[in-house]
Structures are given as structure tokens and as C-alpha cells.
Image (spheres, rainbow, N blue to C red):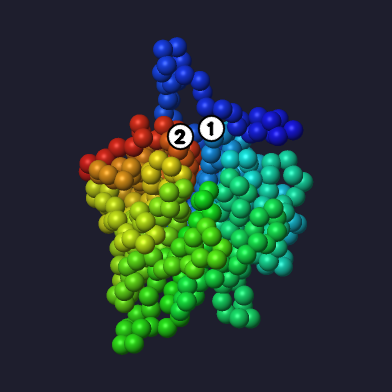
Amino acid sequence: MAGSFLAALGMTAPAQAAAGGTAAPCKPSIQVLQTLPATDDPHPSPWVRRTQVTAIAPGHSRLAVGMSGMKPAYWIGERVYAVPVPAGSSTGRVVDVNRSGLMVGQVTTREGSKAFSYRHGDPAITVLPGGDEASGVNDRGVIVGSLRNAAQNRTIGLEWSGGRLRRELPAPAGYRLHETSGLNNAGQVSGNGRAQEPRPGAQFLVVPGFYWPAYPDSAPSVLGPVDDTGDTYVTREIDDAGRIVGYARRGTEPGSAEFAVVWNRPDGLPVYAPWAPGAIGGTFDSISPNTGVAVGLAEFTYASPRPPDSPGARAQYWTGKGPMRVLPGLGPSLFTAAFAVTDDDRVGGAALDAQNRVRPVIWTCASQQAYVLESPRP
């Protein structure tokens, strides 16, 4: 049964080496995936993330997950499937998927937001007890997420295993949790929050990222730097070595510059990635589990609407050294965004097509397509 299920998803062993010991050649491409009926997305703005590939199942799988027109969706190859959510549900998305095809996400129902898990072929989602948001699942089937407790005016981090609530993830002492953001195969968790009160004499609250060790009895920690400058630090994902990616926002004003960052160690300071040439900011949304490749978004303006002489935002790709590169779009200078990256060099995200529609896409052999943007033009 397990073998036939994985085969249905295209989960096969890596391609055998050709004669002479060389691997089959990689074929760079941009796969444009189907969208759900009546959900062609007319909103190219990166701030309106309605249609996207959010995660790709590891292990040479054809399974990808995300949302289409703000509805939870997944793809096998290029074919789209709607997640069977409860009647009356409005919006939602699939956030993550593991090697065996277990998907997790959240959906807005008549009773409010619900965290869920799902597998291809199930007649309905499985609601995760006590949670309103799921943010990650690892290959052992452990899921993390959170619950907003309005009565207590706080957010509670949660961890499930086997569909059952296993433990709460408390915020570090003196801080409030906003969300959990990532989970790796070692069981380490990343998240975000803020200080409960300003430090004596400080003008701003500290707004840092959080880290939880894999051991339940270990206390969570605050990611550096911990300062009172008004800067915001946001985590997005954690790889199997404990590297965490995200971004830093300088200052508190709207349109403040953002800097893509990597915490190579939870107890260290972030490394600031270079901006793509011509960019005024950038973020990271994902890191590959074992190869250290980070992807995200390069911004060329924070004005809305975008000035006609400014390039659209671009999906960016960084190996941890050298210049920031960007991924090609479906036309010259058209908007792209990256939200997922795998060890086998696939990147998932979204791209604007010539008809001004945002399409879910997967770049295969992304390193062979990524290039340094020399002189961005509209």
C-alpha cells in the first residue's frame, strides 16, 4: 500500500547513474502549474500572496503544495488538486509537506481558523486538536503550529505527533509568541515574537526570532541580536543543521528596508546576505534541508502602486556565498517570488505571466537558471 501511494505521487528513488558513473543530466525549466477553477490570480503584488507553491515534498517527488486563489491546493506534476476542506470554508493554504506526502496547513471555517493535516486521496482533512495554524511537518510526522488564545491575549506554540497534541512550545521568559515558523528533521523549531515590555529607558520593544531545541525539557532561546533600535527580526525556516533564514527590517516606518539574513547557529548573530543588484531590500522564505541554499524575494520598490519605471520583485537565490542571483520569469522583467527550495535544486514559488496572472511555478535545476541581475530595467 505504501509503495503504491508513493508511486502515485511520483516518489521514486533518485535516478540511477548512467554508464560510466555520471548522473542523468539536469534539464532546467520553469514548470507552470495548473490553478483551481475560477482562481486565476490578477494580483501580481508580492504583498498579495494568493497563489503560490509553498513547499515541495523531498525525495525526488512530483508532489508540491500551496494555495490557488487563497484556497488550499496541491499538485502532482502540473495537475492541481483542491484540498477537501469543510463546507463553508473561505480561505486557506497548505504550508508544508514531508517525504511521505503528509501535508499540513490551515483553513478558515465557520468556526474560525483550523490547523489541519491531509494526504492525497483522503476524503477530508484531519483537524489538528487545539490549533488554528500549522507551520511545519518533518519526515518523522511531527507537526508544529500555534493557537491564538484571545481570552488570555496570547499565542501558544503547539507540537503534534500522530495527530495528537504532544507538547506546548512556550515563549522565552519575558516574551510573547507570535508564531512558529519552521521545523527540521531533528525536531528543532523556529518562531517569532516580541518582548512583553520595553527595557528600562528604551523606546522600542525588542522584536526577535525564537528557537526551541529538540529536547522537550530544554528552554527556548531568543535569536540575536537583542537590541532596542526598533529593528524587527523575522524567522521563516530552519534546515536540518539548525541554520535559520528570514529577514531583518530596519526601523519602524512603513517601507523600511528589509535585509535577508541567515543565522548559521541559533546562538550566533545573523549573516546579512547581499542585495540583488539594483534592489533596495530582500527577504528569505526558505532554506534547503541540507545544501544551504536560501531563496526569497528581492524588492526594487516599496511604493504601492509600483512606479512604472521600477522592475517587479524577483525571486532570489543564494548559496551562502558570492552575489545574490535571481531566477528568470515568464517574460522579461516580470514579477517572480520564491517560497520553497529542495536539496535537488528545485525552487517553488509564483510568477506573473504575459496576461498579468500570477501562476504557481517550479524552477527545476534552479542553480543553472539563476543569474546576476546586472542592470534591472522595467
Alpha-carbon span between mark 1 and mark 2: 7 Å
Residue 113 visible to an observer of this rendering = no
Q: Residue at x 29, y 56 (%)?
A: 271
Where, by quadrant of the figure, is residue 19 drawn?
top left
Q: Would you place residue 257 above or below residue 65 in this image?
A: below
Tell me the kind of residue under disc 1. Answer: His
Q: Would you place residue 196 above or below residue 289 in this image?
A: below
**Numbered circle sitting on residue 344:** 2
Where, by quadrant of the figure, is residue 9 drawn?
top right
Determine contact: label 1, label 2, CB under 8 Å: yes
Spot occupied by residue 363 in the image (x, y as percentages of width and height): 44, 36
Within-10-Å neighbours for mark 2: few <14, some 14–19, many 20+: some
Left or right of 280 in this view: 342: right
**Numbered circle sitting on residue 257:** none
Within-10-Å neighbours for mark 1: few <14, some 14–19, many 20+: some
Decide which of tag 1 and tag 2 comes sooner along the chain. 1
Q: Mark 1 points at which residue?
A: 60
Q: Which residue is drawn at 40% across and 35% down?
A: 366
Q: Which residue is drawn at 69% across and 41% down?
A: 120
Q: Residue lying furthest top in this view?
A: 19
Left or right of 166 in this view: 286: left
Q: Residue at x 53, y 46 (%)?
A: 55
| Front-most of residues 330 and 224 | 224
